Image (cartoon, rainbow, N blue to C red):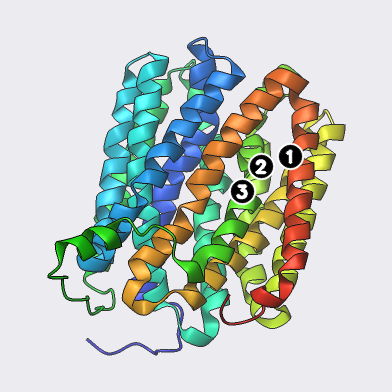
Amino acid sequence: MKSENCNSIWTRAFILLCLAQFLGYAQHAMLAPSLPLFVSHLGGSPFIVGVVLACFAVTSVFIRPLIGHWADRWAESGVLISGLFFQGLSIFLCFVPWVEAAMLANGFRGIGWAGVNTGGYSLLASTAPEMRRGEASGYYSGVQGASMLFFPAVALWLLAASSGDFRLVFAVSAALSFLGAGVGLFMARLAPRVSRPLPQSDSSVWWRELFRFVEPDILLPSVLLFWLNLALPALMNFIVLYARAIGIENFGLYFIASGTTSLLARPLLGRLSDRIGRGVSVAAGFTLQVTGLLLAATVSNLAGIIFAGVFYMLGNAIGSSTTLALAVERADPKRRGKAMATFSVAYPLSYGIGSLLTGSAVEITGYVGMFLLLAVIEALGLLFTLMNSSKLNSSKV
């Protein structure tokens, strides 16, 4: 087999990695509108919806040290494949029409999600050319975000076509993850070989390494990714309940518009962050997200909600791709699995806390108050970014 250009982003390994991520994220995208509607169908309140979504985060967060250690000692591709398979298997618990079963399914799905992201980010770090990491991170996160282009709308269409049969949506979403695991098997043969550290002879050191959760070099990008995604459940999950509450129909168009924004913006803006600096890019991301949340609080029609979603997803695209590039740059190659586990934990942690925060805010202040509260939180993230701009533009924290 001929060696591939070391400066090329689009190697066969990178293409298959992106495809596996796309399929794994496609399952997540199909469940974005489906799970809130399913829990609501079972009689759950907005707060209970938040609890079900938070179960996904709890397991995904606490399993990360073990997953990161596993990636460093075994194989990043193996972690990715196992995560995809487990992610698909877990969703079959939702065939039991109980809220408790949905909680358990989403909790198990979080374990698979930890493997998908820890393994995927670690493989990205080893396959992306050093001088084009911002661009590669943009393409990678763009592929992840591209799942939002079709699959939430597909889920809503399947529900409408089957007269509300959630089992069809769950079966299709599981099949997507299993297909991603199959793609991962092909990718594993092409992935770069990474030398593994020798096992520690001292068992106390081994256990200390296993539970060493926070990697200092990755802490700042992780905090920023967490902050950037706190409001995401409001615009990705609860927004479908809001649309139903105010009588908006054909809401699949919202997910198509926001998904298209994410698909187009992440690669372009990831490349831009290589040129204008990481600090400016992250600040722009927070600014756009605040704009989208304020707009969502003031409109009550489909066109207005779509514009709000486009602004928010544009900000999330540039912020997420930039923080990913920062994490890839700062990860120690000898501890890449643990480092990327630290970074990747930011999303499920923000997803869980954001879901609980959003569900609680809806019950206390209503949807408009919830959007305004989240806008204030994201504005504080912008202030934090400006205070740390010099660190963001340096090679290390």
* Alpha carbon distance from label 2 to label 1: 6 Å
Type of residue at label 2? Ala
Residue, x 35% and y 20% (percent of image)?
101
* Alpha carbon distance from label 1 to label 3: 11 Å
The residue nearer to you, when weighing 112 against 196, is 196
* Alpha carbon distance from label 2 to label 3: 5 Å
| Circles 2, 3 touching at the beta carbon (< 8 Å) | yes
**Residue 46: x %, y % from top left:** 60, 20
**Residue 83: x %, y % from top left:** 30, 49
82 sits left or right of 387 in the view: left
Please tell me whether residue 53 is drawn above or below residue 111 in the rendered image: above
* Residue, far left: 201
Type of residue at label 3? Asn
- Precedes in sequence: disc 1 or disc 3: 3
| Circles 2, 1 touching at the beta carbon (< 8 Å) | yes
Q: Which mark is residue 374?
A: 1
Residue, x 58% and y 82% (percent of image)?
395
Under circle 1, the secondary element is helix
Say which quadrant the N terminus sits in: bottom left
The residue singled out by tag 3 in the image is: 229
Residue, x 52% and y 50% (percent of image)?
347
Type of residue at label 1? Leu
